[in-house]
């Protein structure tokens, strides 16, 4: 067993998931992780989806014990190789900046070359298309910038995070965030930019429909490489489609125009997966469950609009009540305004029945499946809401096809109801019994799912 590290500077942070509404897919420079196109995402609340990371410098006095002191990292309780290229990229860049500070100020403590212990956990499925690498690398980079006291703006930290995971740069800010692809060969102008803060559109909500927790067959890095090499559609997307959609999406966000936001989001998700299908051999990220979600959302939007027009309740009825988007995985993210979420949840619950245990009276199973959406599902609709839902179901039945069908129970494994959130948070500077993932001995407090409570405290 490796000896414990001597106590050193210690920081714990959290960072959010971001889900792109204008997708990034493909790199023009693999080494610098420079994208073929700009992208735009929504930062989701860390109260429901986040990565948490503790970073700690190992004291130089540890060498006096005869221990082999080196960088170490634990992800979700399992030790991983620090030599992984993208992790090395981030560590090298952070240390380079710290060395530059130390070279210019003899009074600063010499921290740049001290070994690091890093522990990181996600509270959501890893590698299943929910941007786990983005939140993870964003959290790591932000934590390191805090640990080394780097005087950087959020934009500069985002540029540093990009060398670990491209999409990570967008998780360095809250609200609605663009990643400008940049044009310079060294990537110095390829970084994130906040389009609007999380407070700008407070009734924008997200409902994540988890269809699978499994690791995807084709990873994003591999998939992008295949697409760049073989897809004829990608060039058209990069050169013509995405620039126009970026401009339209920024306008829609600033104007809080949900119709424009929804249509652009769904069109871009569709085209992203079309490009994946145009890759040779084709890449399949969506499943039958994913396609059923698309069918239901599309039919629901049409039915709700027709009812609104018929009833004349709105001066200019919205064409869209919900927008779907799928990253590189089968899990759907539905964007909707808060007032429409109860109706959408009831439709999802009717057409995608929960697993048997969550459908029954088992409180723990229901809480695990529905999360904070449980109170909306259990709340009886008003007479008017129930009548409207009946009209919508009748329209779906008349339409027929996938949208009218009820999927097998358990087709979805979990629902996550959340909203737009803030950027990274500094949870603790110094060791904290409440939030630190590393114990005072420098080793993780959770290993392979079990707590090391005695050694940690």
Image: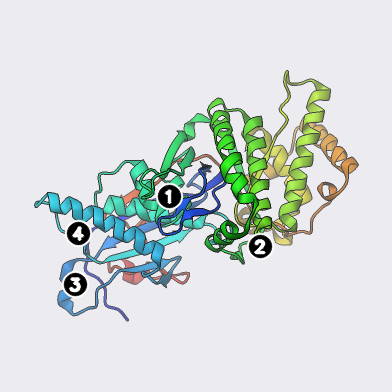
- Alpha-carbon span between mark 2 and mark 3: 52 Å
Residue 267 placement (x, y as % from top left) = 67, 41
Identify the residue under disc 1. Answer: 15
Q: Which mark is residue 111?
A: 4
The residue carrying pointer 3 sits among few (fewer than 14), some (14 to 19) or many (20 or more) residues within 10 Å by Cα, namely some
| Colouring mode (rainbow / by chain / secondary structure / one colour) | rainbow
| Label 1: element kind | strand
Is residue 253 found left or right of 51 in the rendered image?
right
Q: Is residue 66 above or below residue 98?
A: below
Is residue 197 found left or right of 225 in the rendered image?
left
- Alpha-carbon span between mark 1 and mark 3: 30 Å
Tell me where residue 380 sits by quadrant: top right
Q: Is residue 207 above or below residue 360?
A: above
- Alpha-carbon span between mark 2 and mark 4: 48 Å
Q: Is residue 418 visible?
A: no
Identify the residue under disc 3. Answer: 62
Marked residue nearer the N-terminal end (2 or 4): 4
The residue carrying pointer 1 sits among few (fewer than 14), some (14 to 19) or many (20 or more) residues within 10 Å by Cα, namely many
């Amino acid at each position: 067993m490796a000896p414990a590290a001597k106590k050193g500077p210690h920081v714990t942070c959290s960072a959010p998931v971001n889900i792109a509404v204008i997708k990034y897919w493909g790199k023009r420079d693999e080494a610098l992780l420079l994208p073929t196109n700009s992208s735009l995402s929504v930062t989701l609340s860390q109260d429901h989806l986040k990565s948490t990371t503790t970073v700690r410098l190992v004291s130089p006095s540890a060498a006096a014990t005869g221990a082999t002191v080196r960088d170490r990292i634990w992800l979700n309780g399992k030790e991983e190789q620090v030599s992984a290229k993208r992790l090395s990229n981030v560590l090298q860049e952070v240390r380079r900046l710290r060395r530059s500070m130390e070279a210019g100020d003899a009074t600063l403590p010499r921290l740049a070359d001290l070994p690091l212990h890093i522990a990181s956990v996600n509270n959501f499925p890893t590698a299943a298309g929910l941007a786990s690498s983005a939140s993870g690398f964003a959290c790591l980079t932000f934590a390191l910038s805090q640990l080394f006291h780097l005087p950087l703006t959020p934009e500069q930290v985002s540029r540093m995070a990009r060398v670990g995971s491209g999409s990570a740069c967008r998780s360095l800010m809250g609200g609605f965030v663009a990643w400008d692809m940049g044009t310079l060969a060294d990537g110095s102008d390829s970084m994130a930019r906040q389009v609007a803060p999380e407070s700008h559109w407070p009734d924008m909500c997200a409902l994540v429909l988890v269809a699978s927790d499994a690791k995807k067959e084709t990873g994003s890095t591999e998939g992008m490489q295949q697409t760049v090499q073989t897809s004829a559609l990608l060039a058209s997307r990069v050169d013509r489609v995405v620039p126009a959609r970026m401009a339209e999406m920024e306008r829609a966000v600033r104007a809080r125009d949900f119709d424009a936001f929804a249509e652009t989001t769904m069109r871009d998700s569709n085209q992203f997966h079309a490009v994946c299908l145009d890759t040779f051999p084709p890449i399949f990220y969506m499943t039958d469950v994913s396609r059923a979600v698309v069918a239901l959302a599309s039919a629901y939007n049409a039915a709700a609009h027709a009812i609104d027009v018929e009833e004349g309740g709105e001066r200019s009825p919205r064409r869209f009540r919900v927008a779907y988007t799928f990253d590189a995985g089968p899990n759907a993210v539905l964007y909707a305004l808060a007032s429409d979420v109860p109706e959408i949840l009831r439709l999802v619950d009717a057409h995608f029945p929960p697993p048997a245990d969550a459908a029954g009276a088992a409180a723990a199973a229901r809480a695990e499946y529905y999360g904070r959406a449980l109170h909306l599902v259990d709340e009886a609709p008003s007479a008017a809401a129930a009548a409207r839902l009946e009209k919508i179901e009748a329209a779906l039945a008349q339409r027929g096809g996938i949208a009218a069908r009820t999927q097998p129970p358990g087709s979805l494994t979990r629902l996550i109801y959340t909203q737009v959130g803030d950027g990274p948070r500094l949870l603790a500077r110094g060791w904290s019994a409440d939030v630190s993932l590393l114990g005072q001995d420098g080793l993780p407090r959770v290993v392979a799912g079990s707590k090391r409570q005695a050694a940690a405290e």
